[in-house]
Amino acid sequence: MKKKHFKYINTLFVVIPMTLIMAFVGLMRNYGFGEDWFFKFLKAWSVMLPVAYAAAFLIIPNARKLAEKLAIKE
């Protein structure tokens, strides 16, 4: 696999479980196990996944640069 594709797939494998957990916890905290909790969960996750995936490509490079700067100072 090309390194270019690895970055996108690796980010997806990080974002999928993270957004699943966050959507579940947020839904249970706000609504509990109502009669249609599963559909609310899928709706929340379907919005959260693309937003988090796009945000990851903005945040990860900046976080890496910041971490490298902090690590060099120590």
Image (cartoon, grey):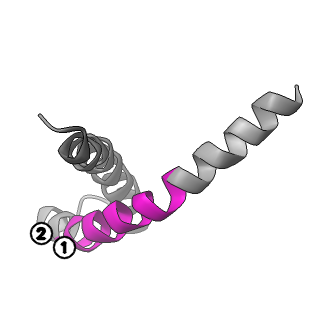
Whether residue 72 is visible, yes or no, is yes
Which quadrant does the C terminus fall into? top right
Residue 11 in picture, x, y percent from top left: 31, 46
Asked if the residue under mark 1 is in contact with the one under mark 2, i.e. CB atoms within 8 Å, the reply is yes
Relative to the observer, which residue lies in front, 24 or 73?
73
Q: Tell me the residue that label 1 is attached to.
A: 43
Q: Indicate left or right for 46 with 22 as reference.
A: left
Q: Secondary structure at mark 1?
A: helix
The residue to which callout 2 is attached is: 39
Looking at the picture, does residue 30 appear above or below residue 17?
below
Q: Where 22 falls versus 43 (above or below)? A: above
Using a 10 Å C-alpha cutoff, classify the residue at mark 2 as few (fewer than 14 neighbours), some (14 to 19) or many (20 or more): few
The amino acid type found where label 2 is placed reads Phe
Residue 29 in sight:
no
Of the 4 image quadrants, the one containing the N terminus is top left
Q: Residue at x 59, y 44 (%)?
A: 64
Start-end of magenta stretch: 43-60
74 inside magenta stretch:
no
Q: Position of residue 39 (x, y in %)?
A: 12, 69
Say which amino acid is labelled 1.
Lys
Q: Is residue 16 above or below residue 23?
A: above
Give SS at disc 2: helix
**Residue at image location 65% in from the left, 47% down from the top:** 65
Prevailing secondary structure of the magenta residues = helix
